[in-house]
Image (cartoon, rainbow, N blue to C red):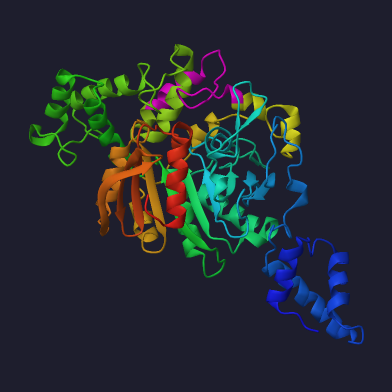
């Protein structure tokens, strides 16, 4: 009797048996399928054929090739039952880079649900924040010891892969101790890590629809990685379907120029300062995005006015991640954290870098958290010895930090705009650019200008979208690109507005109206 693909696969699905995990399993199948009278050569050929079938067809639970050594079997603080498997280990990023991943299977249908890569930004900040504070299936409680179930977890509808990148961020490391990197080197390491994931760790997921997502400086991570994936399809095919970027850095200039408009029209400074800004920074004394240059204006009077506006927005106690939220880190001792974050976002980051150098010379150690956030719960949890053991973190890896200031300061920012990458991506895959509308780190207006400037065909004019009977935000749809705002959300949209965020994410994956 000869079995076809469908028969072998359907048998695996109906029984839930993990076929192919050991040689004994394979030999057992061989004895059932191949008559004993066949000669030895034919038997060996059929054995290899059966192994190929088992790798190509997925069982209902997709466990055939999952790395047992990376399986999380007892996660401290998890006091509720979960219906999915999760894994933690390392992916090979090449050249000695070992990138930590935490893979959470879908709580729905692992076989058919998409696979989604998530990356937090910085550069230098850990994606464990995304997993454990924003959109993962369990969130760390304020006690830093226990985990709370997240009803609006994104793994309700997708298999979620959280990657800590670049090397030296979070639990990731470089065997040579080299933490210096840049945009191109990071995208290459992330691409190599993806190959390792699909070839050596979870080959059964290579057929699933794949999306690359992230927030903040992932506005650079995602497009640069996406280009490598698209250009490498002929040699290493991935079922890439799209990307999503939340409050992402798309253009330094547009982000810098737009935040000055954002600040004035949100009442952060008065008529006198606004008049000075327009008079000294805008041609003809007319305020518009095309006449004003706040980002790189060499006129001293303009620079002074912009500095004053920037101080109000970023240095006087407002929460740059969420305008209407309180700021836990307003004391002077956290200036170094604040400066480090600003150095990532703006054209004149060298000025802030100099301030950072001064801050690092202080006798108190630099603890780099994003400004106006409190990462004590995550730091406490992830530095617990039992948690590190459960996640298979080597004892030689340093303690977990939410953001690595060395990576941040030495990072080579090689792109001023992502426009060339978007022009290529929008021709091949679908995309989502979404923004919490009260974020001041990467504000919605700058990303709106960026998307409009791409000149894409408009499929649907700007309109409200709803979730739970309430206005969730606004959406404008272009050819292969959706532009979405989330009402009342800041920089971390899934954390601030979990239900609307999941609705938006689900709508995008299914390519249905928001």
Name the side, left or right, on which 144 lies relative to 504: right
Residue 394 visible in rendering? no
Write the start and end of the magenta stretch as one range.
Answer: 352-377
Residue ID at (30%, 56%)? 478
Nearer to us in this view, 129 or 362: 129
* Residue extending furthest toward the right: 37
| Residue closer to the observer: 196 or 356 | 196
Q: Position of residue 396 (x, y in %)?
A: 74, 34
Q: Which quadrant would residue 377 be assigned to in this image?
A: top right
Q: Residue at x 17, y 36 (%)?
A: 292
Q: Residue furthest front?
A: 469
Would residue 128 appear left or right of 421 to someone viewing this image? right
Q: Quadrant of residue 282?
A: top left
- Residue plotted at (53% across, 29% down): 405
The reply, left or right, for residue 442 in relation to residue 395 is left
| Residue 485 picture location, percent across and down | 34, 41
Find out whether residue 344 is within the magenta segment: no
Q: Give whichever of 372, 177 is nearer the camera.
A: 372
As drawn, which residue projects farthest toward the left? Answer: 284
Height in image: 350 above or below 468? above
User: Relative to 209, is 348 on the left or the right?
Assistant: left
> Does 354 appear in magenta?
yes
Residue 381 versus residue 90 in the image, above or below: above
Residue 253 at x, y percent in the picture: 29, 40
Count the labels in the image.
Answer: 0
Residue 279, quarter of the rendered image: top left
Residue 165 at x, y percent in the picture: 56, 42
- Name the image quarter holding the N terminus: bottom right
Foreground residue among 218 and 398: 218
Residue 465 appears anywhere in the view? yes
């Amino acid at each position: 009797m000869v079995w076809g693909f469908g028969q072998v696969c359907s048998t695996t699905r109906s029984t839930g048996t993990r076929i192919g995990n050991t040689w004994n399993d394979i030999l057992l199948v061989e004895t059932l399928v191949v008559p004993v009278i066949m000669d030895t050569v034919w038997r060996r050929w059929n054995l290899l054929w059966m192994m190929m079938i088992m790798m190509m067809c997925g069982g209902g639970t997709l466990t055939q090739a999952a790395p047992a050594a990376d399986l999380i079997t007892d996660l401290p603080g998890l006091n509720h039952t979960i219906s999915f498997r999760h894994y933690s280990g390392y992916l090979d990023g090449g050249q000695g880079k070992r990138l930590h991943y935490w893979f959470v299977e879908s709580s729905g249908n692992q076989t058919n649900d998409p696979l989604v890569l998530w990356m937090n930004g910085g550069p230098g900040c850990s994606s464990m924040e995304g997993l454990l504070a924003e959109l993962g299936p369990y969130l760390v409680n304020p006690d830093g010891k226990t985990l709370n179930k997240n009803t609006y977890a994104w793994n309700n509808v997708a298999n979620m892969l959280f990657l800590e990148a670049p090397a030296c961020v979070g639990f990731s490391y470089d065997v040579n101790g080299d933490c210096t990197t840049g945009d191109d080197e990071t995208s290459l390491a992330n691409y190599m890590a993806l190959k390792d994931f699909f070839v050596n760790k979870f080959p059964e997921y290579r057929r699933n629809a794949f999306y690359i997502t992230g927030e903040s400086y992932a506005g650079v991570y995602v497009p640069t990685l996406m280009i490598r994936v698209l250009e490498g399809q002929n040699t290493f095919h991935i079922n890439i379907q799209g990307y999503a970027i939340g409050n992402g850095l798309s253009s330094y200039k547009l982000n810098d120029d737009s935040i000055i408009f954002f600040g004035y029209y949100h009442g952060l400074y008065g008529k006198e300062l606004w008049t000075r800004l327009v008079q000294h920074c805008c041609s003809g004394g007319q305020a518009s995005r095309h006449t004003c240059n706040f980002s790189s204006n060499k006129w001293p009077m303009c620079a002074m006015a912009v500095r004053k506006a920037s101080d109000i927005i970023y240095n006087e106690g407002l929460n740059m991640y969420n305008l209407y939220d309180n700021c836990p880190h307003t004391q002077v001792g956290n200036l170094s954290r604040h400066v480090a974050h600003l150095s990532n976002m703006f054209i004149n980051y060298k000025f802030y870098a100099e301030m950072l150098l001064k801050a690092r010379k202080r006798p108190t150690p630099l603890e780099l958290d994003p400004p106006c956030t409190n990462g004590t719960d995550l730091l406490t949890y992830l530095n617990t010895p039992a948690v590190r053991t459960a996640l298979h973190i080597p004892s030689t890896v340093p303690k977990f930090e939410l953001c690595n200031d060395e990576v941040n300061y030495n990072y080579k920012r090689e792109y001023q705009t992502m426009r060339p990458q978007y022009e290529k991506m929008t021709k091949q895959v679908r995309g989502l650019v979404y923004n919490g509308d009260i974020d001041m780190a990467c504000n919605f207006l700058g990303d709106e200008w960026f998307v409009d400037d791409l000149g894409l065909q408009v499929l649907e004019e700007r309109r409200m979208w709803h979730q739970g009977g309430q206005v969730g935000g606004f959406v404008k749809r272009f050819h292969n690109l959706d532009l979405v705002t989330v009402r009342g959300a800041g920089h971390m949209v899934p954390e601030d507005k979990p239900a609307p965020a999941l609705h938006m994410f689900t709508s995008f994956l299914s390519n249905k109206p928001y």
